[in-house]
Image (spheres, helix red, strand yellow):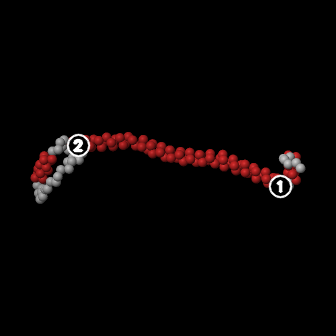
Amino acid sequence: MRVGFEPKSLGKKIEKIPQKYVLIVMIVLVVAVLAGLYYFLMMPQLERKAKAAKEYAEVQMQLGRLKSIQRNIAKHRQEYTQMQELLQEVMRQLPESKDIPNLLRSVTSVTEETRLKVKQFEPKQIKHTDFYS
């Protein structure tokens, strides 16, 4: 008795199998190979493509926001200069130093000129901030 692999006997055994079963086995093998190729080669590529498409959409959205900012930058710069001018004007109206007694005198004189009657005036403790007290 001889143990081993003999290709001639295998060929004879395959010839005995009906052709429809051989065809079915071949189709199953081809489908299995194609499924393996799809799973191992195509799926990672499709995932990368989906991720790239998502990133592209995000970048496009960010680009749209930046372009809208760019279109409006001249208007914003103009508003900024107007606000700076307004700040300078208001700063000129405020006293340079802590001149609270003169401010109180001017308020008193304005009330006298307009003939307002002040029933009660009670100054509180002075609180200092950046631009005024």
Q: Secondary structure at mark 1?
A: helix
- The total of numbered circles placed on residues is 2
Q: Residue at x 34, y 41 (%)?
A: 78
Image position of 93 (left or right of 31): left
> Within the image, what quadrant is residue 87 found in?
top left
Please name whichever residue, 2 or 25, is drawn nearer the observer in this view of the structure.
2
Please name whichever residue, 7 or 33, is drawn nearer the observer in this view of the structure.
7
For label 2, the residue is: 91
Cα separation between marks 1 and 2: 98 Å
Residue 106 makes an appearance in the image: no
Q: Residue at x 47, y 45 (%)?
A: 62
Give the farthest residue toward the bottom. 119
Residue 121's spot in the image, x, y percent? 13, 56
Residue 75's spot in the image, x, y percent? 37, 42
Image position of 68 (left or right of 114): right
Residue 132's spot in the image, x, y percent? 21, 46
Q: Secondary structure at mark 2?
A: helix
Give the farthest residue toward the front. 1
Q: Residue at x 30, y 43 (%)?
A: 83
Residue 70's spot in the image, x, y percent? 42, 41
* Circle 2 residues within 10 Å: few <14, some 14–19, many ≥20: few
Instruction: Pick whichever of labels 1 and 2 is earlier in the sequence.
Output: 1
**Labels 1 and 2 touching (C-beta < 8 A):** no
Q: Amino acid at mark 1?
A: Lys
**Disc ID at residue 20:** 1
* Circle 1 residues within 10 Å: few <14, some 14–19, many ≥20: few
Q: Amino acid at mark 2?
A: Met
Residue 32 makes an appearance in the image: yes
Image position of 85 (left or right of 19): left
**Disc ID at residue 109:** none
Q: Nearer the viewer, mark 1 or mark 2?
A: 1
